[in-house]
Image (cartoon, rainbow, N blue to C red):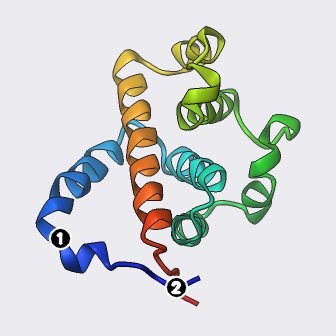
């Protein structure tokens, strides 16, 4: 794979709103491990190596157990994820695969059970943000560090 474009270098001003959104959605309401699990799961679905590298490193640096990272693609079959995390991961998949899922009522009911209204908005914006970063990373073939 060859990088196509360094979008941070080319258009730093255009990325300021994305960076501002990123700062807001990483706020204190959502726990660090949940944020990283959401970012990793969306990045797995989208095949963004750059974001997978970054967020797996960030998750480990924040103290996340490697087994939770390893089993994330099979989170539905693992008991390592809390009901709140499971609801967030289902919602992540629903919004990331929106054309296929239509954001089912069942998945929304899951987040409604475990997240306040404000947290639901924050979680949904977090999912939107990582999907946008994934599209930039994959589209421009961002290279992760070795």
Can residue 146 be seen in the rendering of this structure? yes
Residue 25 shows which numbered tag? none
As drawn, is 64 to the left or to the right of 79? left
Q: Nearer the viewer, mark 2 or mark 1?
A: 2
Q: Badge 2 local density, few (<14 within 10 Å), some, or many (20+)? A: few
- At 40% across and 57% down in the image, what residue appears? 133
Residue denoted by label 1: 11
Considering depth in this image, is 17 or 72 the residue closer to the camera?
17
- At 16% across and 70% down in the image, what residue appears? 12
Up-down relation of residue 57 to residue 136 (above or below): below
Up-down relation of residue 107 to residue 142 (above or below): above
- At 70% across and 34% down in the image, what residue appears? 82
* Residue 72 position within the rendered picture, expressed as x and y whole percent measured from the top left: 74, 50
Up-down relation of residue 132 to residue 97 (above or below): below
As drawn, is 48 to the left or to the right of 126? right
Residue 2 shows which numbered tag? 2
Up-down relation of residue 67 to residue 49 (above or below): above
């Amino acid at each position: 794979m060859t990088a196509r474009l360094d979008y941070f270098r080319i258009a730093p001003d255009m990325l300021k709103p994305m960076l501002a959104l990123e700062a807001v959605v990483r706020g204190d309401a959502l726990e660090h491990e949940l944020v990283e699990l959401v970012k990793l799961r969306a990045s797995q679905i989208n095949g963004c190596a750059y974001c997978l590298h970054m967020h797996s490193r960030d998750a480990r640096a924040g103290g996340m157990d490697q087994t939770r990272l390893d089993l994330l693609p099979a989170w539905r079959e693992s008991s390592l994820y809390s009901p709140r995390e499971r609801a967030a991961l289902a919602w992540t998949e629903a919004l990331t695969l929106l054309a296929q899922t239509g954001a089912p009522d069942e998945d929304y009911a899951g987040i409604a059970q475990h997240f306040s209204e404000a947290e639901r908005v924050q979680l949904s914006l977090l999912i939107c943000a990582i999907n946008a970063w994934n599209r930039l990373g994959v589209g421009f073939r961002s290279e992760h560090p070795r």
